[in-house]
Image: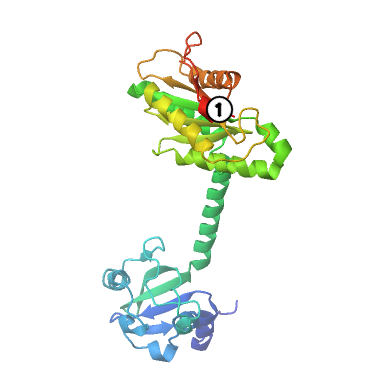
Amino acid sequence: MPRLLPPSPDAMGEIFNSINLGLILVNGQQQVTLWNDWVVKHSGVKTGEALTKNITEAFSEAPSPSFISAVSNTINYGLPVVLSNALHRSPLALYERGLEQTGKRIHQSISLTPITIAEERFCLIQISDSTTSIKREKILRSHSELLKKEATTDGLTGLYNRRFFDEHYKMALGHTLRQNTPLSVFMVDIDFFKEFNDHYGHVAGDHALIQVASTLKKQLQRASDVVARFGGEEFVLMLPHMNQEAASQFAEKLRQAIWDLNIPHVKSQIAQQVSISIGYSTLPGNDASEPNILLTTADAALYRAKRNGRNMSFFLNPQPTQESSPNPHSDDKS
């Protein structure tokens, strides 16, 4: 069987320089004894300029203290070290195109391995460019966040959608029962919106929906408050910690805010501008009734507001047998 001879030094050099990886070898005095072409390309420092220099002086800028410490530990204690990109983004002055690159350093993943040659401890430094993988990870994360947003957001108005509301409604109900705090829900409907679309067109209708949605959202003040598009021209708002008295004031605030937009609506049967009807209900913190009836009651209250003339708010307790009087605003009607 023929004997395999080790590669010549020139061949080894060719191998080191053809690897798509940075290779640096430093001796026990931390002097550079190997500096391959990959490092030349990304540092802008030629091999002849780096050889025999201390690793702290070989680059155009001094390496990070964590890198110098890792080299010392590898040489002194024979400990392999990995400098992950997550904690050590760019410890070495390496750029996409060496010193010609004036921008940010490339992201680096660095492994340090102890090597013993002729009873002398060396440190082999292997460097890979993590920039592409980092960019890919950011793209994937951004894509994931976009998909998540699309799954919970209404595409037209930018409000939360019905799916998001349903999930948070369940959590808010649970919190209300555990913490003995009130919860108010408001169902909002744009009056005679079909007639608006038929007269002005769907483009104008979409614009009106966006205006109404944005205005409703501006009325919220706490992070726990939620407004969502419930479907078509209907919206729903959920406000934890809001009692019945505060809910009555808030309902009027919502109605007036939309009225103040002064969006023309010549086909409305109650006014010459866009108005809304509101049905709302409040679950007191000490209420022992079935909590799931809250949303149903608010919807029933909305029906009463529309039946009693629209452009008004109407309250119902979360028991079907109890209801309050409507809260019309005759001064706003045509």
Q: Is residue 268 above or below residue 110?
A: above
- Which residue corresponds to mark 1? 311
Judge from the rendering whether residue 186 lies leftward or rightward of residue 81; answer left or right. Answer: right
Q: Farthest residue to the bottom: give it.
A: 48
Judge from the rendering whether residue 194 lies leftward or rightward of residue 67; answer left or right. Answer: right
Q: Name the one closer to the observer, 331 or 91.
A: 331
Residue at the image position 39 percent from the left and 39 percent from the top: 221
Residue 78: x %, y % from top left: 30, 69
**From the image, which quarter does the N terminus lie in?**
bottom right
Secondary structure at numbered mark 1: loop
Residue at the image position 37 percent from the left and 70 percent from the top: 112
**Is residue 93 shown to the viewer in this render?**
yes
Mark 1: amino acid: Asn
Res 211 quadrant in image: top right
Residue 176: x %, y % from top left: 38, 24
Q: Is residue 237 above or below residue 44?
A: above
Residue 35: x %, y % from top left: 43, 83
